[in-house]
Amino acid sequence: MNPVVYVLTHPEYKSTKVGHTHVPHARMRELGKYGWWPYRSLNVASKNMAWAIEQQSLFTLRHRLLVPAHLTSELLPAGWSETASQSLISSEEVWETVCVAAAETYMEPVIGEFRPTPPRPTGGYQRTKSDTPKYVPIARLLAAETARAAQSVEANKRRASRYRKEEK
């Protein structure tokens, strides 16, 4: 059975939870007793990868998006720190955070027992257009976002330069 990274929702608490497990059915049953409903889940290659995706997602939620933990240990003894209020961030946005973390983790050269094959050549290797397999759509998405961000930075530099010239 493959490890899973999951997003759950709780309608009463209006809360979303991110987690990972290597025994999905047992964990879902356990949390279901407390009123948690599955939103989405992602099968991954290893326990280490599942843990890394969960941690990256939580880091993004807490430190980049500034979404605090929603529940207390009294309400959810195991996993309260992995919750977020749906009034601050929707379940869909949490799921998108998990997907981005999964893409970043999958593209890392080595994570625990996960090793991509074949290994990339070392040294002065330059990536080519055919280097990334076409069946990895997230790689195309990340490349497009990187290019878009670079264009935006260049456009802002040009605007700032024009503004400085107009001031003189």
Image (spheres, grey):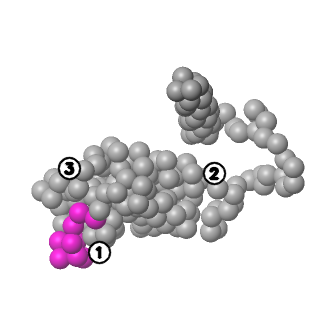
Dot label at residue 78:
1
Residue bounds of the magenta highlight: 69-78
Q: Secondary structure at mark 3?
A: loop
Q: Amino acid at mark 2?
A: Met
Dot label at residue 87:
3
Residue 85 placed where, x, y %?
Answer: 23, 56
Q: Main secondary structure of the magenta part?
A: loop
Residue shown at the point (63%, 64%) measured from the top left = 111
Q: Amino acid at mark 3?
A: Ser
Q: Amino acid at mark 1?
A: Ala
Which residue does the numbered mark 2 point to in the structure image? 107
Q: Is residue 72 magenta?
A: yes
Residue 96 placed where, x, y %?
Answer: 41, 45
Farthest residue, direction front: 168
Q: Secondary structure at mark 2?
A: loop
Please indicate whether residue 15 sits to the left or right of residue 50 in the image. Answer: left
Q: CA distance from mark 1 to mark 3?
A: 22 Å
Residue shown at the point (84%, 52%) measured from the top left = 121
Q: Earlier in the sequence, mark 2 or mark 3?
A: 3
Residue shown at the point (17%, 61%) measured from the top left = 35
Residue 71 placed where, x, y %?
Answer: 21, 67
Foreground: 109 or 89?
A: 89
